Each structure stands twice: as structure tokens, then as C-alpha cells.
Image (tube, helix red, strand yellow):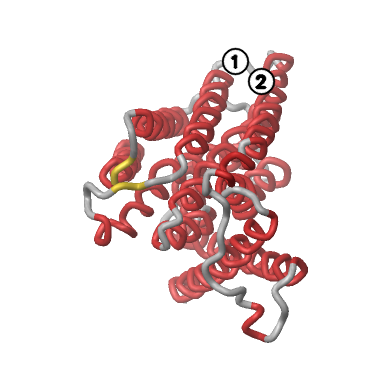
């Protein structure tokens, strides 16, 4: 019964992702913004909202059966760091796998270059700060809060730079374009801003419901398998909560919208690599436990690998499969 419910929640997420991406393409087209802004900010933040609640709820309200608040912090820290790990490794490789047959191992992946480099630069810098903060004693609250505030400001600067670059990208032919008609218009509704926002909210609501239901069932399975809270938050919860980004990006890359597909993932990496670690640094122990430290290292290697390949001239399908191999390596090391 649990696995049937898992399947039903997955179907709901797939339907919701189609509704959401369809509305988002029309919103970006109507506003006249670049694919970079649509993918890296609108799509990334919108689909990241459900999983953002997991670490926040864990940190602020979780109480273990023994009354030990450390379990809540473990889940919170694991979810904060597990999300970028999942996005930078598994999600990236799933995009490649979805077009592997069509494009081939040596096939080209062509996201807009400057936006992808900007996303990766900001993420790598922020995640290095997050790693350094783990070695600052909790008693040095002033330094920790300073790093946390710096990371929040980093995301603000990132958003401003992404929006500022939009006009030039639109002029260069990277404007957001909607290929399919609005789904709600098929019901007889007009295609206007109100209808677009209505469908956008509908898609987002379905994503939240689907992700929440999926998380609940995953947690049930984890309890049956006697998985620890930290391992649950590092491995299992991110797989469930990152499903909206994975599905959206797969839908876009299969349509040839590589910039939207990448921006959806790398934009979410910047969002979850700045704001959420800032909360973790300021409100939890944020200590360098083995599983956590290993996750940070693997995540940084995955991001630096992408940054290196794009600097060398472009991305091929097999380059993204390396990110998937890094996830498998992390699994093997943690489970061992």
C-alpha cells in the first residue's frame, strides 16, 4: 500500500510539473524576460519552496521521541546540504540520461553560457563559505552570523545580476518562448496574465501536495528500514523533495530548452546554497560530521567539474553523466 501511494504521488508531481512549466513559459514570454531569469529565478525558487520547508520545520519544531533537539538539527542540516548534493549530481545526470538516446554520448548540451557560469560561480563561492563555517566554533556567534548575513547578501546580488543581464540576452535571442498553448485555455479561458498566474499557482499547489505526500511515504519506508535521521535527510528526503526540479528540467531539455533546464537546477542550487545554509550556520551546531563533510566535498567537485567543462568550450552528454557517477560514489562511501 505504501508503494502504491508513492507511485500515485509521483504521478501527481509529473502532472503538476507539466502544468507549472507550461504556465511559467507563458509568464516569461509575456514579461519579455530571458530564459535565464525564467529558469534560474522563477522556476528555481518556485519549485524549491516545498523542500525549503523541510529543514526549517526540522530546525524550529522537530522533537525526537527522547526529547533530544539534536535529531531535529541533524535532519535540518542534512536536508540543507543534501538538496544541493542531489541537484548537482543526480538531477544533472538525469537530464543527460533523458536525452542520451536522442543526442548520443558525445551529443552537445547547449545552455546559455554566461548565465550558467554565473550560477556556478555564485554557488561554488557560497558553498565554500558554508564549508568554512563548519570549522568555526559555535561560541563565535558574531563570526557565524557575519557569514550567514554575507550569504544572504550573496543571493541578493545574484538575483540583481541575473535580472540585469536579461535585456541583453533577450536581444541576443534567448527570450523565453512558449511553444504550447496554455492548458487552462483549452477549458475555454482566455490567455491573459490572470489566467497564467492562476495556472502557475495551480501547478505550484499540486507540486507542494505531491511532494509533501511523497515525503511522508518516503519517511514511512525509511522507518521500516531503520534508517538514521541524518542519513534520511541526506539521501532519502532530497530525492523526494527535489523531484519538481528534476521533472521540470527533464521536460525542458527534451524539448530542446537547455537554458531553462539548466537554470532550473543551477538556480535552485544557488538559492539552496546561500539562504538555507545561512540559517543552518546561524541556528544549528553546523559541525563537520563525516557524512555531511563528504557531501559538501562531492557537491563542490560536481559543481567545479561543470564549471571546468563549460570553460573548456561546452558540455557533452557524457560530462553530465560524470555527475551521476559522483552521486553513486557518495552513496558507496556513506553506506560503507
**How many C-alpha atoms fall within 10 Å of the one at disc 2: few (<14), some, or many (≥20)?**
many
- Residue 167 position by quadrant: top right
- Residue 197 seen from this side: yes
Extreme right residue here? 194
- Residue 196 position by quadrant: bottom right
Q: Looking at the image, which residue is at 45% across and 28% down?
A: 293
Nearest the camera: 97 or 118?
Answer: 118
Task: Using residue 35 as the reference point, say whether residue 143 is left or right of it.
Answer: right
- Residue 287 seen from this side: no
The alpha-carbon separation of the residues under discs 2 and 1 comes to 10 Å
**How many C-alpha atoms fall within 10 Å of the one at disc 1: few (<14), some, or many (≥20)?**
some
Nearest the camera: 2 or 47?
Answer: 47
The reply to whether callout 2 and callout 1 are in contact (CB within 8 Å) is: yes
Name the secondary structure under disc 1: loop
Q: Looking at the image, which residue is at 52% across and 49% down?
A: 173
- The C terminus sits in image quarter: top left
Q: Which residue is mark 2?
A: 147
- Residue 95 image offset from top left, x and y in percent: 38, 53
Q: Which residue is mark 1?
A: 136
Amino acid at each position: 500500500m505504501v508503494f502504491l501511494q508513492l507511485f500515485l504521488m509521483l504521478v501527481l508531481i509529473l502532472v503538476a510539473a507539466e502544468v507549472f512549466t507550461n504556465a511559467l513559459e507563458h509568464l516569461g514570454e509575456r514579461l519579455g524576460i530571458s530564459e535565464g531569469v525564467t529558469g534560474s529565478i522563477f522556476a528555481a525558487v518556485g519549485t524549491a519552496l516545498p523542500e525549503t520547508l523541510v529543514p526549517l520545520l526540522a530546525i524550529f519544531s522537530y522533537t525526537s521521541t527522547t526529547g533530544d533537539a539534536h535529531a531535529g538539527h541533524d535532519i535540518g542540516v542534512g536536508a540543507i546540504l543534501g538538496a544541493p548534493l542531489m541537484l548537482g549530481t543526480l538531477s544533472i545526470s538525469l537530464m543527460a540520461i533523458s536525452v542520451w538516446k536522442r543526442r548520443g554520448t558525445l551529443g552537445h548540451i547547449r545552455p546559455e553560457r554566461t548565465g550558467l557560469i554565473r550560477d556556478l560561480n555564485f554557488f561554488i563561492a557560497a558553498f565554500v563559505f558554508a564549508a568554512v563555517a563548519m570549522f568555526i566554533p559555535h561560541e563565535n556567534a558574531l563570526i557565524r552570523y557575519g557569514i550567514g548575513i554575507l550569504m544572504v547578501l550573496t543571493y541578493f546580488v545574484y538575483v540583481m545580476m541575473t535580472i540585469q543581464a536579461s535585456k541583453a540576452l533577450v536581444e541576443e535571442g534567448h527570450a523565453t518562448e512558449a511553444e504550447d498553448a496554455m492548458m487552462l485555455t483549452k477549458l475555454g479561458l482566455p490567455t491573459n496574465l490572470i489566467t497564467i498566474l492562476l495556472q502557475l499557482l495551480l501547478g505550484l499547489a499540486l507540486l507542494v501536495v505531491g511532494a509533501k505526500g511523497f515525503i511522508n511515504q518516503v519517511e514511512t519506508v525509511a522507518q521500516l528500514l531503520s534508517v538514521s535521521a541524518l542519513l534520511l535527510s541526506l539521501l532519502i528526503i532530497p530525492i523526494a523533495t527535489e523531484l519538481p526540479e528534476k521533472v521540470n528540467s527533464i521536460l525542458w531539455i527534451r524539448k530542446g530548452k537547455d537554458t531553462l533546464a539548466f537554470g532550473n537546477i543551477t538556480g535552485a542550487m544557488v538559492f539552496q546554497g546561500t539562504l538555507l545554509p545561512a540559517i543552518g550556520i546561524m541556528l544549528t551546531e553546523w559541525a563537520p560530521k563525516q557524512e555531511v563533510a563528504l557531501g559538501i566535498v562531492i557537491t563542490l567537485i560536481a559543481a567545479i567539474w561543470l564549471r571546468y567543462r563549460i570553460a573548456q568550450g561546452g558540455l557533452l552528454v557524457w560530462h553530465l553523466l560524470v555527475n551521476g557517477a559522483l552521486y553513486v560514489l557518495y552513496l558507496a562511501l556513506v553506506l560503507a
